[in-house]
Amino acid sequence: MIRMGNDEFILYLRKNGLAKGVPSPIIGKKIWEWLSPKGAKIVEPDKECHWGKTGDAIDEINLPKTATQFEFDEMILPDLYKFLNTF
């Protein structure tokens, strides 16, 4: 099992120019909808992101202030990133 959060996935999307203009809460919901049927569990629903709650890139369209953290089988990571690349 691995523990990762929406903050990491949203950062990946933003750094790669994906999901432009899509609010972070919508991205987070779609990620959970993808992860949930694959046995993922929410371990922290509203954890403060490592980069904190303030800054030029912290807002609904860039990076989130908080993010849900999940625990899931690391073997699905390649498929998860394929999914993220469809945004």
Image: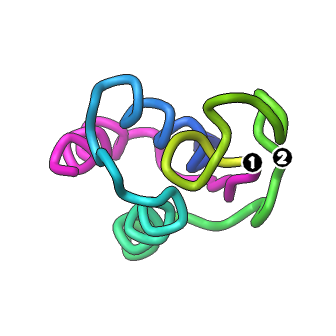
Number of labels in the image equals 2
Position of residue 38 relative to residue 82, above or below, is below
Q: Specify the label residue 48 is tagged with.
A: 2
Q: Amino acid at mark 2?
A: Glu
Which residue is rendered at x = 29% and y = 39% of the image? 81
Which of marks 1 and 2 precedes in the sequence? 2
* Magenta segment boundaries in residue numbering: 66-87
Q: Quadrant of the N terminus?
A: top right
Depth check: give the residue in front, 3 or 30: 30
Q: Position of residue 4 (x, y in %)?
A: 61, 42
Q: Pointer 2 and pointer 1: residues touching (CB < 8 Å)? A: yes
Position of residue 81 relative to residue 34, above or below, is above
Secondary structure found at label 1: loop
Q: Specify the label residue 41 is tagged with.
A: none
Q: Position of residue 76 (x, y in %)?
A: 34, 46
Q: How is the image coloured?
A: rainbow
The residue wearing badge 1 is 65
